[in-house]
Every structure is written in structure tokens, then in C-alpha cells.
Amino acid sequence: MPHSNPEDLEKMIHRTLRSLPDRRAPRTLESRVLAAIEAQHAQPWWQQSFTHWPLAARGAFLLLSGMVAAALIVMVFRSGPEANAVSALSGPMEIIRHIKATFAGISRFGSLVYRSIPPIWLYGSIAFLAAMYAALFGLSATAYRTFINQR
């Protein structure tokens, strides 16, 4: 059978699998599935997924979530001595400021390096990468034809 084509192999596998007897499910499977479905429906609405909540509860949740998000945004951007809640967030906000400053420094350095490279080098690098991509594509197609199509 080493010289058969894929269609014959597929037909043989199909015949072999069709000739196998059907497997029987365990006797307790149906009762376990129905019990699990019943237990899921017996849960209170707040323990089910969000789409099963009543419409009023979903609306109230979204409204309260929006209000909390708006309050947090106002507290973060409020400045001055009256912003007591901002002091609780100053530690994480300071870390964010340091990260932002680090990325800004890296960006400035990258921009400086980019501007110092002669344009002919950039164009040459792009041409080299395109040639390497084309070579990889050609080698892959050749390998596919050599190794896969011979089977």
C-alpha cells in the first residue's frame, strides 16, 4: 500500500471506520447531564453569566460601573490639596510616570539613532530584507515540492 494515492487511502480509512461498531454511552450519562443542566438553571441569577441577568440588573450594573470609572478618572486627574484620594493613588501613578519617562527617553534615543543613519543604508537594508524574504519563500517552495509532493 506504499504507492497508493491519498484518495484511495481516504476511502480505505473511511470504510474501516464505518465498519467499526458504535460505542455505547455509559448508562448514567444521560442522568448526569440532565442533573448538571438542572443544577445550572437552579442557580440564582447573580451567580449565572451576565447575559442571564435580568435587564434591570444589567442596566444598574453598567450604570454603577460607569459611575465608578468616572469617579476614578476624576480622582486621578484632580490636583491640589483637596484631592485626598489622589494621595492613595500617588504610588502607582508615580510608577506609571517613571515608565512613561523611560519610554519617552527610549523613543528619543531611537529617533536620534534613526536620524543619524544615512538613507542609502536604510534603503539597502530594506532591499536586503526583501531579497532574504524572497529567498526564504523560494527555498520553502522548493523544499515543499521536493519532500512533500514526492509522497
Image (cartoon, rainbow, N blue to C red):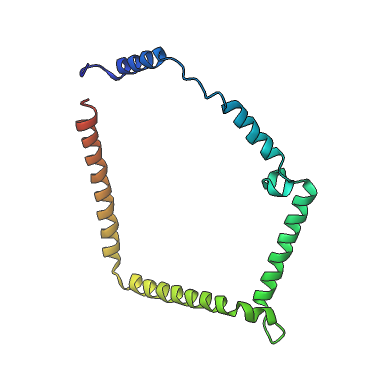
**Quadrant containing the C terminus in the rendered view:** top left
Tell which residue pokes out farthest to the front in this image. Answer: 28
Which x, y percent locates residue 19? Answer: 39, 12
- Which is more toward the observer, 115 or 95? 95
> Which residue sits at x=20%, y=26%?
150
Which x, y percent locates residue 14? Answer: 38, 16
- Give the left or right position of residue 23, taking residue 31 as reference: left
**Quadrant containing the N terminus in the rendered view:** top left
Question: In terms of image quadrants, where is residue 85?
Answer: bottom right
Q: How many marks?
A: 0
> Which residue sits at x=61%, y=77%?
89
Indicate whether 76 appears above or below 20.
below
Which x, y percent locates residue 60? Answer: 77, 55
Tell which residue pokes out farthest to the bottom in this image. Answer: 81
Indicate whether 90 appears above or below 21.
below
Indicate whether 149 appears above or below 86.
above
Tell which residue pokes out farthest to the right in this image. Answer: 56
Question: In terms of image quadrants, where is residue 20?
Answer: top left
> Which residue sits at x=67%, y=39%?
40
- Give the left or right position of residue 38, taking residue 7 as reference: right
Which x, y percent locates residue 22? Answer: 46, 17
> Which residue sits at x=44%, y=72%?
103
- Which is more toward the observer, 133 or 40? 40
Question: In terms of image quadrants, where is residue 29?
Answer: top right
